[in-house]
Image: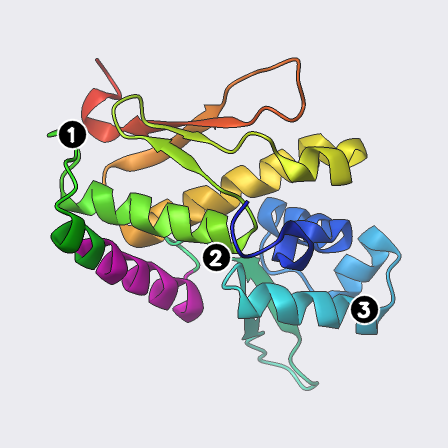
Amino acid sequence: MSTATVGYSAISSYSRVEILHLIQEQPRRTILELQEATDLHPNTIREHLARLISDGFIVAEKEHRTTRGRPRVLYSAADGDATRSAIQRRKVRDAAQRGDLMRRVLTVDVPDVLETRALHQLDALVEELEDEGFDPIIDDSALTVDLTPCAHATAQADHREVLCSVHLSLLQGVLTEAGGPLAVDGMRSSCDPSVCIIQLLHAATAHD
């Protein structure tokens, strides 16, 4: 397990996972809509939203109004494409710089198929996972990310399907923001809920 424990990660709280899931499914959500969907107190929702914003998972924007009245604040998931987070952008850039430095110092060998942009995507992916309390094992050749054992599978066993969906969307957002040929292909099925292996896809082999 990395130095960032699962208990302190943004997705350690199922309330935050639920809120993020709702926002991923439908962008430009309001606090009122989230309150109606979750039955959480508005102040609690605001606290969770603030944490998700600070981690670069969502962004807030004020509604453009042409009529009188205070504009609402709308919340959307940072997908690295239509909705981009300055925080997520900075994290991705910093991860690439640290990755380049590590490869220069350690003279790490990487597969020929992984050009610089793909390496930078993996840099961002690994740092995001470590921030969330995982200790990822990357297989550069098979393009897999092994997160086994998944501590969230035990802590949030009753919500595994939603948690996995949210997590895959988060990781895809990171890859998209980093820019490159890699994308999340899905999660390998397993009878053991603690087993979590994410399969990535390289654009060059997508139609092979």
- Residue position for label 3: 44
- Residue position for label 2: 78
Q: Identity of the amino acid at label 1? A: Pro
CA distance for labels 1 and 2 = 30 Å
The foreground one among 23 and 49 is: 49
The foreground one among 143 and 19 is: 143
Q: Is residue 136 above or below residue 67?
A: above
Q: Which residues are magenta?
A: 84-100
The foreground one among 39 and 156 is: 156
The N terminus lies in quadrant: top right
Colour pattern of the rendering: rainbow
Residue 109: quarter of image: top left
Contact, mark 1 vs mark 3 (Cβ under 8 Å): no
Q: Identity of the amino acid at label 3? A: Thr
**In this rendering, the label closer to the viewer, 1 or 2:** 1
Q: Which residue sits at x=61%, y=44%?
A: 25
CA distance for labels 1 and 3 = 46 Å
Q: x%, y% of residue 93?
A: 28, 63
Q: x%, y% of residue 160?
A: 71, 32
The residue furthest front is: 106
Q: What label does residue 111 carry, if any?
A: 1
> Which of the marked residues, 1 or 3, is nearer the chain's N terminus?
3
Q: x%, y% of residue 122?
A: 31, 43
Asked if the magenta segment contains residue 163, the reply would be no
The C terminus lies in quadrant: top left
**In this rendering, the label closer to the viewer, 1 or 3:** 1
Asked if the magenta segment contains residue 89, the reply would be yes
Q: Is residue 195 above or below residue 98?
A: above
